[in-house]
Image (cartoon, rainbow, N blue to C red):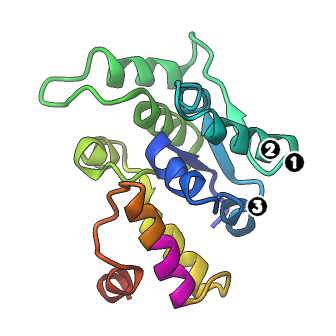
Amino acid sequence: MTEPLFFDTDCLCAFLWVRNESLLPKLYPERVIIPKPVYRELCRPGIPHLKARVDTLIKQKQVLIQEMDVYSKEYATYYELTEEPKKGQRIIGNGEAAAISLAKQYDGIVASNNLRDIQGYITEFGLRHMTTGDILTDAFQRGFITEDEGNDIWAQMLAKRRKLGAKSFTDYLKLKI
């Protein structure tokens, strides 16, 4: 798997909040892409420390910020998803829309936990999708973390009000493996 991973805000923040963002470039070197709208969302008041953590990864060339030209195909898709969705589809947030639009344009993978809002677009565009749980499972299977470490990270994420779909990493593994 060499496709770029386009992160939405929630999935990226799950790792930022618990100070485990360095796991992402270890797992996916030169493949972690943060859409510019996601980066802008990190500029909100009350979370400047999260943006600072991303800035460190950028300076270390471990992640890339991806812009969208207003005249590009990906921006047209982004606009549709955030402003004028097709009949029967819902408007979604800027971060999710940017990740989907870029993944569609560049044959990438959407990294998002927000399944309810994005599943219709994932299906419509035939995109691959990963959640925080999938990323931690990958880290476990590749030996980057132990199951106990996964449970600790999971508990910290839950304490930061991340919605992960299971009570523990062990429970998530039972569902996936």
Q: Quick one: which residue is furthest to the top in this view?
A: 71
Work out how far the residue at label 2 is from the one at label 1, CA to CA, in angstroms.
6 Å
Query: Mark 2–mark 1 contact, CB under 8 Å?
Result: yes
Foreground mark, 2 or 3, reads: 2
Dominant secondary structure, magenta: helix
Work out how far the residue at label 2 is from the one at label 3, CA to CA, in angstroms.
15 Å
Residue 28 against residue 62 in the figure, above or below: below
Q: Quadrant of residue 67?
A: top right
Magenta residue check for 150: yes
Q: Is residue 100 visible?
A: yes
Query: Mark 1–mark 3 contact, CB under 8 Å?
Result: no
Which residue is depicted at the point 46% across and 33% down? 95
Reading the image, the residue beneath label 2 is 56
Q: Determine which of the numbered discs, if any, sits on residue 29 in the image.
A: 3
Q: Quadrant of residue 142?
A: bottom right
Q: Position of residue 91 (x, y in %)?
A: 26, 25
Residues 133 and 48: in front is 48
Q: Which residues are magenta?
A: 147-154
Q: Determine which of the numbered discs, if any, sits on residue 60 in the image.
A: 1
Q: Quick one: which residue is furthest to the left in this view?
A: 88
